Amino acid sequence: MLSWACGTIASALRGARAPPLAVVQRGLRSTSSRFLAGPGEGAEKPLRAFDPALLEFLVCPLSKKPLRYEASTNELINEELGIAYPIIDGIPNMIPQAARRTHQHKKQEETEQH
Amino acid sequence: MAAPRSYVLWSYCGRGWSRLVRTCGPRGLHSSLPAGSLGVRFLSQEKHATQTHFGFETVSEEEKGGKVYQVFESVAKKYDVMNDMMSLGIHRVWKDMLLWKMNPLPGTQLLDVAGGTGDIAFRFLNYIQAQHQRKQKRQLRAQQNLSWDEIAKKYQDEEDPLGGSHVMICDINREMLKVGQKKASDQGHKAGLTWVLGDAEELPFDDHKFDIYTIAFGIRNVTHIDQALQEAHRVLKPGGRFLCLEFSRVNNPLISRLYDLYSFQVIPVLGEVIAGDWKSYQYLVESIRKFPSQEEFKEMIEDAGFQKVTYESLTSGIVAIHSGFKL
């Protein structure tokens, strides 16, 4: 009973202290703008980092097969052909001439040739 | 390959003559003399099975890519200033017209090839955002008697102003991409765009991924245009649209004369004065003259498998917008 009374009083007080609508709106607007600015403020970083969502679009320009993102070397790797495409400043370099051959596949290819 | 009529203009300019002799000389000999009588120099040329043009120069296909790269590496920083100076700002209108023609809807996945400086990409994002704002305004006008609850709700679920639209910018030149990235942060474009270094002839994208493919003032510089067109066709979704803005042929003889005069006499000078680079701008005007005419290019687009191929000449045909659908 007492707790119920306290609850109603508290809620009544809260209701009385509720800010006028304009303030609420301003508050909402500021949160929404902060929400919008949120990813923007960090934009400097994501620009440099690689977004894995991009893997849905990107394929190896030679084999047109999907690539794997290797976070440790910051490269996109085509396992099948043994090629690694570097990501520099957040921009994947998908030019085959600039790609690096990964080691073990090179050996395999050599044995195949001989 | 007959020397274009524009060569007449070259006689005014000492530089032009030496180039003319250089480019036409060996090529002429090459075709008229049997291979046995050629010197070592010509034999070494023989090694390159296929040749292409770099402006009015004939170069091997391997060389062209490198040369084009050098041009755009060199002009990247002054690219916008020079475009404004050379076209008197009209290039902006041409690009706007490409967007009007595209009329993208929210949710459009765009691939902009050779779009390093972001000219098309930013216009695309702005266009979509403007559309979204118009929609919001219309809604606001239609719903004047919202309850406070509804108003509060409106502020809570903030809609994505791009409606899921995304532009993938693919350019072969890192310098151009850098300029674009800088412009993007200056103009406040943060969401909805991705930069990829890639070759138009070997696109690093999966099949059927994009609603629209654009290439503005880029396809001219590609070594194998047919291959680039096939790649465009491959990455587009069925129903997707190919749009190309490129310099074309001026049909009016009077305007053509004036245009030639301006191109060959004024543009390289502007290039030298503003960007300190005569050669790159010389290449620019030459490459424009080498690019196929509206009808020829239309056929090339059709050959790549596109349907409903149309074009629209702008500014007397100085540029044209080509359009085709993957159906």
Image (cartoon, coloured by chain):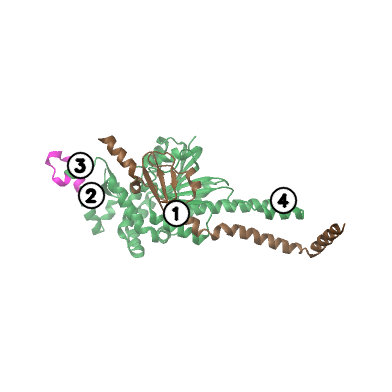
Chain colours: A brown, B green
Most common SS among magenta residues: helix
Tell me the chain of label 2.
B
Residue on which the image places disc 4 = B142
Q: Specify the amino acid type for callout 3.
A: Glu
Q: Of residues B244 and B240, which is closer to you in this image?
A: B240
SS for dot 1: loop
Q: Which residues are magenta?
A: B25-42
Label 4 to label 3: alpha-carbon separation: 72 Å
Tell me the chain of label 1.
A
Which tag, 2 or 3, sits closer to the chain's start? 2
SS for dot 4: helix
Q: Specify the amino acid type for callout 4.
A: Ala
Label 2 to label 1: alpha-carbon separation: 42 Å
SS for dot 2: helix
Q: Residues within 10 Å of mark 3 (few under 14, many from 20)?
A: some
SS for dot 3: helix
Q: Quadrant of the N terminus of chain B?
A: top left
Image disc number at residue B23? 2
Which tag, 4 or 3, sits closer to the chain's start? 3
